[in-house]
């Protein structure tokens, strides 16, 4: 049987929205939503929260996850990358359980509209065995790369992507492009622990609806997600 660990990184020192992982959303802390999603996915052996913050750890316990260790302060700074945080969590859990994992899921608490079935789809696709990683992505409805510009010098405007001139076609006929939702990354243990990559070179995509990939990074993001939770935005009308 494959052994899968789901790691939810959640440090206490968010700067954009202070204490972001603990803000109230729909009557419970933000991080509780991703914990609940992960616990619904069959095939995950262990769900853990990696945090240095005692209050976040207490919330995790309240919502069904027992943090078996605290993240070192050196891995909780503003500029610390996700990779060493995830590797630390895997190493700690493998020492505790005395057994290696075959698959590693990284789930971001800041994407609370992520659906359990999307997480499950990433894991199921990885288990087919023909790739290193699977990532949840959403189609970009606006801000297509062909529309993006750079300014060089004082005011010289050039295309960010060189497509041989300005592409003024309607967005409906532009080639589809996608971006990571940030919600779910599924990778083999070898990819993360040996090759030191959250996402390996041989990656696959699980496409999800745009609204499920809303990542709370600003007060505006938070306001929109709250409107959706309160039923004031009909998600069926969103891309």
Image: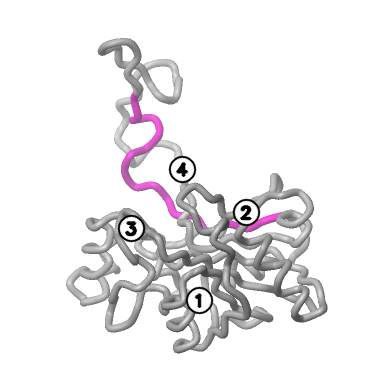
Q: Say whether marks 1 and 3 touch (CB < 8 Å).
A: no
Q: Look at mark 2 in the image and give the residue it sits on.
A: 83
> Is disc 1 surrounded by few (<14), some (14 to 19) or many (20+) residues within 10 Å?
some
**What secondary structure is marked by label 1?**
helix
Which residue is at 38% across, 59% downward? 14
Evaluate if marks 2 and 1 touch, with contact meaning CB atoms under 8 Å apart: no
Determine if the magenta segment contains residue 44: no
In the foreground, 39 or 117: 39
Expressed as whole percent of the image width and height from the top left, the position of residue 35 reads 49, 78
Give the structural element (helix, strand or loop) at label 4: loop
> What numbered label is drawn on residue 81?
none
Q: Which mark is residue 239?
A: 3
Which residue is nearer to you in this view: 183 or 89?
Answer: 89
- Residue 64 lies, with reference to residue 95, above or below; the image says below
Element at label 3? loop
Image coords of residue 150 (percent x, y): 35, 22
Apparent side of residue 176 relative to residue 75 in the rendered image (left or right): left
Real-space CA distance between mark 2 and mark 3, rounded to the nearest whole angstrom: 31 Å
Provide the residue span drawn in magenta. 132-149
Tag nearer the camera, 2 or 1: 2
Q: Which residue is mark 1?
A: 116
- Quarter of the figure with residue 190: bottom right
Alpha carbons under labels 2 and 1: distance apart = 23 Å
Could you tell which of marks 2 and 4 lies nearer the N-terminus? 2
């Amino acid at each position: 049987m494959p052994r899968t660990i789901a790691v939810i990184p959640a440090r206490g020192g968010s700067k954009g929205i202070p204490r972001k992982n603990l803000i109230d959303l729909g009557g419970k802390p933000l991080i509780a939503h991703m914990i609940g999603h992960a616990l619904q996915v069959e095939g995950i052996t262990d769900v853990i929260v990696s945090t240095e913050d005692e209050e976040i750890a207490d919330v995790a316990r309240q919502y069904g996850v027992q943090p078996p260790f605290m993240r070192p302060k050196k891995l909780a700074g503003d500029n610390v990358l996700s990779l060493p945080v995830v590797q630390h969590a895997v190493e700690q859990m493998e020492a505790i359980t005395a057994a290696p994992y075959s698959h590693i899921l990284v789930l971001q608490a800041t994407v609370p509209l992520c659906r359990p079935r999307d997480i499950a789809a990433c894991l199921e696709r990885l288990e087919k065995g023909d790739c290193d990683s699977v990532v949840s992505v959403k189609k970009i409805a606006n801000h297509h790369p062909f529309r993006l510009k750079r300014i060089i010098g004082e005011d010289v405007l050039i295309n960010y992507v060189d497509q041989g001139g300005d592409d003024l076609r309607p967005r409906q006929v532009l080639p589809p492009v996608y971006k990571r939702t940030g919600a779910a990354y599924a990778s083999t243990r070898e990819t993360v622990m040996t090759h030191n990559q959250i996402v390996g070179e041989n990656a696959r995509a699980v496409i999800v609806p745009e609204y499920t990939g809303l990542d709370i990074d600003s007060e505006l993001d938070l306001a929109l997600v709250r409107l959706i939770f309160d039923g004031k935005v009909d998600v069926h009308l969103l891309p």
